[in-house]
Image: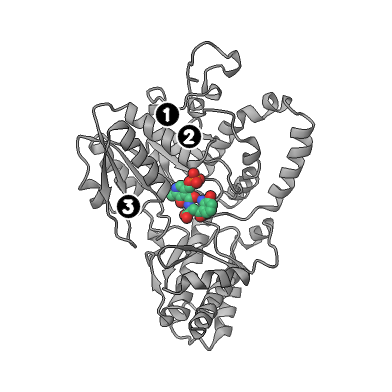
Amino acid sequence: MPPRTSFSDTSFSDTSAFTERAADLDTQDPLAPLREEFLLPAEVRSYLDGNSLGRPTRAAAERLGSFAVDEWGARLIRGWDESWFELPLRLGDRIAALTLGAAPGQTFVGDSTTVILYKLIRAALTAQPDRDEIILDAGNFPTDRYVLEGIARDHGMTLRWIQPDPVDGVGLDDVEALLGERTALVVLSHVEYRSGHLADLPGITAAAHRHGALVLWDLCHSVGSVEIALDTCGVDLAVGCTYKYLNAGPGAPAFGYVAHRHQESLQQPVQGWMGAADPFAMGPAYQPHPGIRRFISGTPPVTGMIAMESMLDLIEKAGMPAIRQKSEALTGFATELVDVLLLPEGVRYSSPRDPAHRGSHITVDHEDFGSVLPQLWKQGVIPDFRPPHGLRLGLSPLSTSFTEVLLGVETIRRVLLDVRDAR
Ligand SMILES: Cc1ncc(COP(=O)(O)O)c(C=O)c1O
Ligand SMILES: Nc1c(O)cccc1C(=O)C[C@H](N)C(=O)O
């Protein structure tokens, strides 16, 4: 029998239909073999949190061990000359080529997302002393908002807040309504961390430029799951974390992107020795390195970068178009399941219904989800929770199967009913 195109004709009692459909989707998935490249511990029955922390690849686990023994252990300080010094820019260029649509020499790896946000925002403002307004949105991730609040406080900037639709996020009109000749910078997330809404990056970037403003995009929830074209769209600045869909491991350093046309004119505020023109000259005064390296500050976190190379290999093998296609299929399947299994139990959507308008996660709401989550984790089903009542299903395209999604949503339904019955 051909796989069903939807569950609209299926009652929950026919769970075999769901199981059969999930199995068919996994069989037909051209990227399914790549899932075996990840560590898949049996007790994790359904991992739905790759947009917080991606699974490790098997190769990363092995690579971390050999790095400790063969490089750190055997080469010691010689490792810096042999490979580590170039790592931030070599990995930056790889991330750029594979996931950002960016030419070489514009992307570096190092620091946390928060610290790079601070450095690039400060650099953008210093370059525009005659502009004193920043556009941001109340739905952005807290670290973005907190960094901007601190900079506004310390440097006399006015924050122009967008109050976005909780599901449909920041729209072009929202930004255009606040743009003006005093706008220095627009700071937004490409994919919204709670709803998963996918912003109109090209349109908003062009609108900001029409008013002479710069744009900084936070790519944490899009890099590695959504196709991005920073150079083509004329993006000025971008930042993204590597521990979500780039599977670089907890606390792995972020990347920063600075378009070539800005590099000479931007001065980043944490001018450390590793961003100097000749770090080991240890000269009397700071002279910035002529290229993207000037945005590095101190010693880059080499150990934290080791794991990401093997994930970049998998992304290179799969290609971002196929990865995005799998992502849309996974979130599309998840919404089909939510429609049949969860909406009847009072669960509500907090994400756009159209896969083209969202990243690789969806959020559903119910007042009991705060109590449901711990039970799910105990049963090896691992989404995460975002206030006030949101269960977030993060579907990493290369490491998530359709069967895993079905198991997850079915378990969410069962635990939700158990929690309700226990009252
Ligand atoms: C949009 C966004 N920005 C930034 C961060 C995190 O910043 P950091 O890596 O500095 O904790 C996250 C979550 O990890 C995020 O979702
Ligand atoms: N980034 C995180 C972290 O470093 C530790 C624990 C959790 C997280 C997160 O999931 C935050 C993430 N950016 C979010 O979208 O909520």
Q: Are marks 2 and 1 in contact (CB under 8 Å)?
A: yes
The part of the image, by quadrant, that contains residue 362 is: bottom left
The residue that mark 2 highlights is 103
Tag 3 near tag 2, CB within 8 Å = no
Q: Nearer the N terminus, badge 3 or badge 2? A: 2
For residue 138, the mark is 3
Q: Secondary structure at mark 1?
A: helix
Q: Secondary structure at mark 2?
A: loop
Position of the N terminus by quadrant: bottom right
Can you give x and y, in whole percent of width and height, for residue 337 in the image?
48, 76
Q: Quadrant of residue 95?
A: top right
Badge 1: residue crowd in 10 Å (few <14, some 14–19, many ≥20): some
Give the labeled residue for mark 1: 260
Q: Earlier in the sequence, mark 1 or mark 3?
A: 3
For the residue marked with disc 3, what is the amino acid? Ala
Rendered residue at 56%/24% (across/down): 274
Q: Position of residue 69 (x, y in %)?
A: 79, 38
Is 147 on the left or on the right of 172, as rendered? right
